[in-house]
Image (cartoon, rainbow, N blue to C red):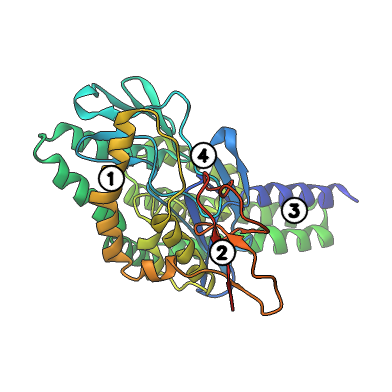
Amino acid sequence: MGDGQLFLLIFTLIYLTDSVAWFGPRGFLLVSFLGRRFRARRHRVYFAGFKSGFALLNPLPPLGQGYVAALFPFSISHTGISPFGVEQPNPGSPVLPSPKSQGWAWDEIKKISVDNKSLYVNGRVFWKFSSTYSARFWKERLQSIHGAGESDRSALVDKMVRSYLDSRRPRRRLAVFQKAVRSLRFYCIVLFLQVFILLPLVYARYHDSLELLWVCCLIWMTMWFASFMSFALHRRFFPQFKSERWQHLFLSLFLPNHTIRSCDFLGKRLFYDSHPLAVFPILSLDASVEELRGAMARDIHCPAIIALSRDIDKQVVREFREQYFLPAFEKVFPDYIDQAEQSPKLAEDDDDQHYYCPRCHTPYQQSAEGCVDCGGITLERLVRS
């Protein structure tokens, strides 16, 4: 293997490391591979210490796009806030906050701040996000509710929940984004073809010659066009995130693997303030989304059991679920109870003495005390089909 082939191999491996999307345990990756039909995916690899995992994006930019949306991370009510959420990934164990996190009544809160991807309340870590976008978004929402009068907080929480579940804002944003990103996508496709097709062909024929230098100059010019176009679009859609914008510009000017993924760099952050159920209706999704909706419905109808020791956590979680989340969720997803109550069926020749978890549908060979993954939910008997 010559130096040119070795360099191309190393660069390809580096490029593939950028073909992933990092998101939290409550996040979903909506990715298209061929055509315009999207698939909803959870993380394939999860790192508990970082509170995040990743799933694969389309490695070929001309053939796909990726977006990320997440469930509610914690509970909010007119009484206070709690790091324990009412939505959990299903199937899977409940996502628990940091051991140092705790619930707070609104009159106990003195300061709400963000440091990188962590949300702090009164100087203590309240929740760790997988992106600075989500951390700042929830910081602003908590500050607006905290600064309001006691009589206005209930209306603000209700408005925030309904806005997070509403499809109209992400629908308008997606329409504008898809139109604005067309030119950038064209340059990313051209750059991809130049790096992985034109450059190897020229090197194979001319090796270290003047022709190779001209091709490298052409690639760098394309990188500059795409980098500054991505910079302008990032400033248009995310004006408050200056440091990340400049960082991506610097990397894109000198590293073509970053430049090629510019569309995904923008797309992964487009729905940081929207629920997956708000994004599903505006994208053309494949059949797997119905199974995902059913899993989410079962989690809402039969939530995982989490032991709460503090009274403020118990009260806030109960209020958020019963007074704010469920009414808004039933409006957006009115048939969720029908999907939640659907149970798996047994084949005719199978033994009917089997049980299953009503939340995650994990089968059990015999009756047990409860589902291990869902906090001990009482098992139900499978029905013979």
| Front label number (3 vs 2) | 2
SS type, badge 2: strand
Q: Label 4 crowding class (10 Å Cα cut-off): few <14, some 14-19, many 20+?
A: some
Nearest to the eye among marks 1 and 4: give it: 1
CA distance separating discs 3 and 2: 74 Å
Indicate the quadrant where residue 115 lies.
top left
Q: How far apart are marks 4 and 3 (CA)?
A: 27 Å
Label 1: few (<14), some (14–19) or many (≥20) C-alpha neighbours in 10 Å: many
Give the number of the disc on residue 320.
Answer: 1
The disc labelled 3 sits on which kind of residue? Leu
Residue at left offset 57%, top offset 47%:
369
In x, y percent, where is residue 227?
49, 50
Q: Report the mark closest to the observer, 2 or 4.
A: 2
Q: Is residue 128 above or below residue 355?
A: above
Question: 294 above or below 149?
Answer: below
Quarter containing the C terminus? bottom right
Q: Where is residue 108 in the image (x, y as percent from the top left)?
A: 23, 22
Task: Tell me: 39 left or right of 326.
Answer: right
Residue 363 visible in image = yes
Tell whether 143 sits left or right of 380: left
The mark nearer the N terminus, 1 or 3, is 3
- Marks 1, 2: nearer the viewer: 2
- Comes first in the chain, label 1 or label 4: 4
The disc placed on residue 210 is 3
Residue where numbered disc 4 is placed: 250
For disc 2, the marked residue is: 381
Q: Earlier in the sequence, mark 4 or mark 3?
A: 3
Q: Closer to the camera: disc 1 or disc 3?
A: 1
